[in-house]
Amino acid sequence: MQHANTKKSEIIFKTLSKLLREERLRQNKSQRLLAYEYDIQMSLISRLENGINEPKLISLWTICEALGIPLSELIRRVEQEIPKDFLLIEQ
């Protein structure tokens, strides 16, 4: 299903992708190593980090567990990165 506000959704997904990549790199892990250590498809990690697909909740949760951060922490970081006046719903 396409969102009526696809452009705004992209801001969230791009921010999410950037933060996942930054966290993985901060931990000095390659996509290959992370995939191997936690039996996660490397293509999933790549797609999430490149913002190719709209991420599923379970995929985000899995990657967060592998990175050792709560999903809520990732969401908090996304909220901090996007503009304070950002809204998906037009008011």
Image (spheres, rainbow, N blue to C red):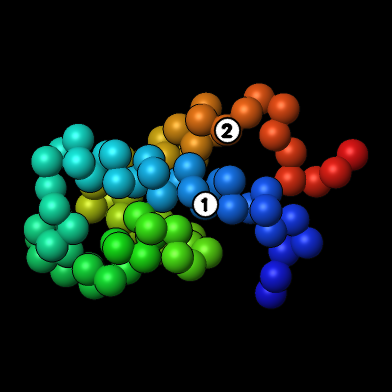
Does 86 sit left or right of 16 as displayed?
Answer: right
The amino acid type of the residue labelled 2 equals Ile
Considering every residue shown, the one lying at the far right of the view is 91
Q: Residue at x 39, y 44 (%)?
A: 18
Q: Position of residue 27 (x, y in %)?
A: 16, 38
Q: Is residue 74 above or below residue 66?
A: above
Label number found at residue 82: 2
- Which amino acid, by three-letter code, is at mark 1? Phe
Q: Report the side of 40 relative to 73 (left or right).
A: left
Q: Residues within 10 Å of mark 2 (few under 14, many from 20)?
A: some
Residue 61 visible? The answer is no
Q: Residue at x 16, y 69 (%)?
A: 39
The location of residue 48, given as percent across then percent down, is: 38, 60
Total marks drawn?
2
Find numbered disc 2 in the image and state the secondary structure of the residue it sits on. loop
Q: Is residue 86 above or below residue 66?
A: above
Residue depicted at 32% across the width and 68% down the height:
44
Report whether 83 appears left or right of 20.
right
Where residue 36 appears, as percent x and y from the top left, is: 10, 65
Q: Quadrant of the C terminus?
A: top right
- Cβ atoms under marks 2 and 1 closer than 8 Å: no
Q: Which mark is residue 13?
A: 1
Residue 67 visible in this rendered orientation of the protein = yes
